[in-house]
Amino acid sequence: AKTYDLEVWLPGQQAYREISSCSNFEAFQARRMKARWRNPDTGKPELVHTVNGSGLAVGRTLVAVLENYQQADGSVRVPTVLQAYMGGMSCIKRHELH
């Protein structure tokens, strides 16, 4: 079995923190649920391999964006890959209350 962790740098903690994990459980879970497939080469049933992947830890992901993209004036640059999901916005500016 193999696991891959996705980590982000959090400057405030001076450390990388995990925000997601993906694992190949091979036949471990399949054995318990008796999930099989018929191998066309041998004609025999074999256990399948199962995978597991968690979504992103939203809080840590948001903290990572804020800590890595906040500017001196308090605004936050929107990472290029996220701009399409923010209506094309490239910067989030501070809102001043009057």
Image (cartoon, rainbow, N blue to C red):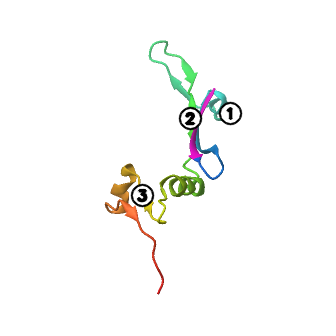
x, y percent for residue 15? 64, 44
Crowd rating for badge 2 (residues with CA inside 10 Å; few <14, some 14–19, many 20+): some
Residue sitting at 57 percent across and 45 percent down?
9
Q: Left or right of 25: which side holds 62? A: left
x, y percent for residue 8? 56, 44
x, y percent for residue 59? 59, 58
Three-letter code for the amino acid on which mark 1 is drawn: Arg
**Picture layout, residue 61 above or below residue 41:** below
**Disc sitting over residue 32 in the figure:** 1
Crowd rating for badge 1 (residues with CA inside 10 Å; few <14, some 14–19, many 20+): few
**Disc sitting over residue 77 in the figure:** 3
Q: How far apart are marks 1 and 2 (CA)?
A: 14 Å
Residue sitting at 49 percent across and 59 percent down?
70
Q: How many marks?
A: 3
Residue sitting at 52 percent across and 26 percent down?
37
**Disc sitting over residue 85 in the figure:** none
Q: Range of the magenta residues?
A: 1-9
**Picture layout, residue 51 above or below residue 15:** above
Secondary structure of the residue carrying tag 1 is helix
**Picture layout, residue 94 above or below residue 54:** below
Q: Distance between the residues labelled 3 and 2?
A: 35 Å
Q: Nearer the viewer, residue 2 or 11?
A: 11
Characterize the magenta stretch by its predominant secondary structure.
strand
Three-letter code for the amino acid on which mark 2 is drawn: Val
> Which residue is identified by label 2?
51
Three-letter code for the amino acid on which mark 3 is drawn: Arg
Crowd rating for badge 3 (residues with CA inside 10 Å; few <14, some 14–19, many 20+): some
